[in-house]
Amino acid sequence: MPALHDFTTWQPLLRLLYAAHTETLTAPGGHVAGQISPGACSVPLPFRPPQPGRASQVSDSQEQFDAVGQIVEALKENGSDGVSFVVEASSAPSGIRLHLIRLGSSAEPGVATAHPGTLLLADGALPEPVRRLPEPVPGVVPAPSADVELLQRTLRERLPDAVGASDEEIAAVEARLGVPLPTELRALYQVVRSQYEDWDDYREPYDTVGCELFPLGEVYVADAASRHVPWKFGAMEAVETGPEDAVQGLVGSPGWIVFGDNGGGDRIAIDLTPGPDGHVGQVIIISHEENIGAGLVADSLTDMVVHRHFDGRPVRRTERPPLVAYVNHVSVPSFEAAAHPGLEVLSLGVWEKEPLSLAPVFGLPRLRTLSAYPGTLADPCEIARLTHLEYLELPPAEWRVLLDAGAVPTGLLAAGIEAHRQQDNPLQTIALANEILALYGRPPISDITVLEGAVS
């Protein structure tokens, strides 16, 4: 098997990279970078168009697939889940210096980039939305449509050959979950346990129940820990539940009991911790494409299964100042317009005017996240006046200003360096990251192996 830290393992890919980026790699300071894992890769090689008159085929890029595949095999042999790399020219003719980067415990991986992702500045720290638990809502009750007898009778009529779960099987899953099954969900599984071997046609329970019904042993609690939310995304969200909301806007809840799937990766759950306009036992859908919140499907499991209600209820939104503000040339026009006591997240994006002062948001009691594009802040050192920040994302130049001035906020839980994927060298980003990590007593990103050789 190819060895991950053997130059010859990388040589086929390096040869392709050198041919595609000769001008860049022969220029002073030139580099190319990428990331490879067994499940995905981000490698800067040009697309090879197919022959005229036919669609693209694997054979059109077979050389690329083979070169990357050799590294994937080396990763598997090494027991590694991925590696980032930076390629630079060395002094020898057609010479290459290859830096292989493995992140330690102090950083999350970047998304499709060799640059490090979020720097983790405190052990076990989580983004604020992930830490949020459901709020108690006095007076919420099951929906009038909830009817256990009607639900069971309908299921038996539609699925006369179904095999139900025994009391012992239900008791076992309740012990595993640590909570009793909701009444309607218990009634459903008493009629149809949904083991795969029970069906000749897997679509039969889907057509009857309205979702892909999980076997009883796969039912789980969709608490916040079950929904992986990287810091980079979680820090930019805010939990918000208004009086008009049926579902609390959480990452997850100990009262969300998942029992199915919509066939596209979105989970279907019973909600025991509803919002102010919801019902205990309502059915919700948890999107796999979103980091926070869930949508109402039906007021009860009976409503969904018996009455075929799948679209929730119309919601008349109440206008409130946003907890997350995006200040840029097409959205919120200024920090003054964004500022209010409840503001939690502030993002400064593409800006075509003079750089802005942070003065309008000084003293905001809940402002915990700041993200800014290059050159948009009039004075990066003003960030030190934002005393409640947990997450700070800045370009390298702005971080350099804070580090040189000794003005990096001391209370951060995580930080991001918003480097340009190809223009900024990941090795320089890593050096900057190590300076930030050192301020918080965190171990550096130090596992970098350097290999040298020729590509021809």
Image (tube, rainbow, N blue to C red):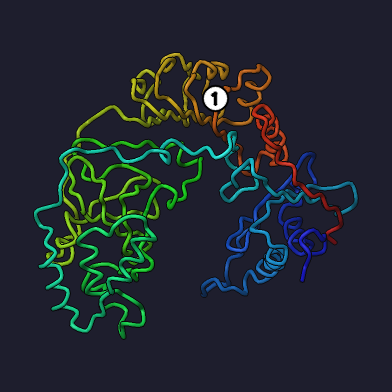
Spot occupied by residue 318 in the image (x, y as percentages of width and height): 19, 33
The residue type indicated by label 1 comes to Gly
> Image height check: is 338 above or below 62?
above
Residue located 77% across and 39% down the image: 29
Residue under pointer 1: 411
Residue located 32% across and 65% down the image: 171
Spot occupied by residue 262 in the image (x, y as percentages of width and height): 31, 64
- Camera-side residue of 112 and 37: 37
> Image height check: is 294 above or below 165?
above
- Camera-side residue of 117 and 268: 268
Spot occupied by residue 134 in the image (x, y as percentages of width and height): 31, 41
> Image height check: is 129 above or below 211?
above
Left or right of residue 206: residue 233? right
The quadrant of the picture occupied by the N terminus is bottom right
Q: Residues within 10 Å of mark 1 (few under 14, many from 20)?
A: some
Quarter of the rendering containing residue 292: top left
Residue located 47% across and 27% down the image: 351
